[in-house]
Amino acid sequence: MKHLSILIISTVLLASCGGGEPSVDELIAAGETDAIAQRKTELLNQKKELENEIRSIENYMDNNAVKRAGSLVSVKTVNDTLFKHYVELQGSVDTKQNVTLMPEMAGVLTQVYVKEGQRVSRGQRLARIDDGGLAQQIEQMKVQSELARTTYERQKRLWDQNIGSEIQFLQAKTAYESQQSAIRSMQQQLAKTVVTAPFSGVIDDVITEQGNTVTPGMTRLMRIVNLDDMYIEVEVPETYIADIEAGTDVEVEFPVLGKTMNSKVRQTSSFINPANRSFKIEIPVDSENGNIKPNLTARLKINDYTREDAILIPLSVISENSNGEQYVMVATNRESGEPYDTAVAKRRLIKTGKTSDNMIEILNGIQEGDQILVEGARSVKEDQEIRIKA
């Protein structure tokens, strides 16, 4: 191996003496580290010199081209298009039928007839509270009521035959009617011991278990939810009151679910909140869209403005003069040629409308078919000759 290295070095030296520098591959094969490092430095210096020369040539060519045919720009031909503007807000799903049931009567919760997740119908029995002997009292009162009814009927027959006094008849009638009223009142109290579903829905949560003592207005028994009529209610700034009304299109996005659905404004409030100068709108949500639950976050895109033949241009091409007027540069008198088309730059004052996705609506100053300057627009002046990229 030592003899081979000596042989390679000798070959390199002979080639050097012969008038030619060794190549990089030869230096690497010979393992000449110092020579390789020196060659790298030389090549880097050559690269830097070449880059400087190229840059000088490019600057010269660009300057010479500008003098000949003006600044190099790109243009965009304006066409009318359908334009929809959206107001973006955030809200959450709600339902009018989302109720936590509480007892109307104190006592022990003796029976719970449903479980979580169970579908129930309106009026279905859900739970029972111990009546504290009310049922027995009603039975006793019915017995007394029967006696009062019999007494009243006998007194009525006698009174119809002009037998007996009127006061006896009236007392019997009053006793019977009072007994009936008392029974109805007790039956209403007894009905409060049975908890029924106020509407059809799903038992979302059974909060109080069987055997616990419950108190009216304090103890929460269970929560029942109906997902058939869900909606989103949001507050909209009053500036949009003339643009958003019942029937306005809305795009509803549920970020957590990765789903989007289309809906419409169902109702708008007739009242403006003086605290934040906003009004409420309600958007229905299709419960069959899947996994949509109350309190789910939603992003709303409300279509407050639509124009069929709108002129849209990029926001980046708009400039402003010393008077605060907005303008764009357009290409006029365009002539085809090689390698670039030539034209003259003209300034157009414009009136702008709504913006969307870095585009802006032009209400006046630009029409379909105009060619606006895009790249290089800010570097040209009025009546300057320009070169247009192909």
Image: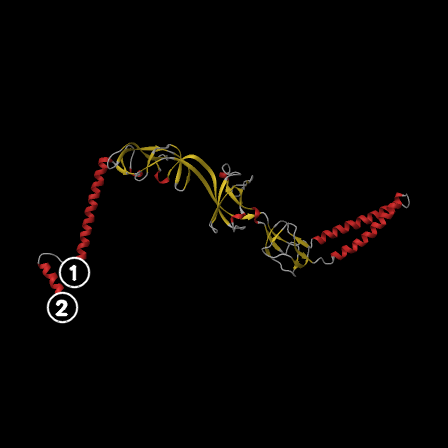
Q: Position of residue 236 (x, y in %)?
A: 50, 42
Residue corresponding to mark 2: 3
302, above or below 207, in the image:
above
Q: Residues within 10 Å of mark 2 (few under 14, many from 20)?
A: few
Q: Residue furthest top?
A: 333
Residue at the (13%, 68%) spot, across then down: 3
Q: Residue at x 82, y 47 (%)?
A: 174
Q: Is residue 41 above or below residue 169?
A: below
Instruction: Identify the image quadrant of the C terminus.
Output: top left
Tag 1 residue: 27
Task: Tell me if 332 is positioned left or right of 159 in this view.
Answer: left
Nearer to me, 1 or 381: 1
- In the picture provided, is 121 more to the left or to the right than 338? right
- Residue 143 or residue 41, whichever sits in front: 143
Q: Quadrant of residue 126?
A: bottom right
Image x and y of residue 369, in percent: 35, 33
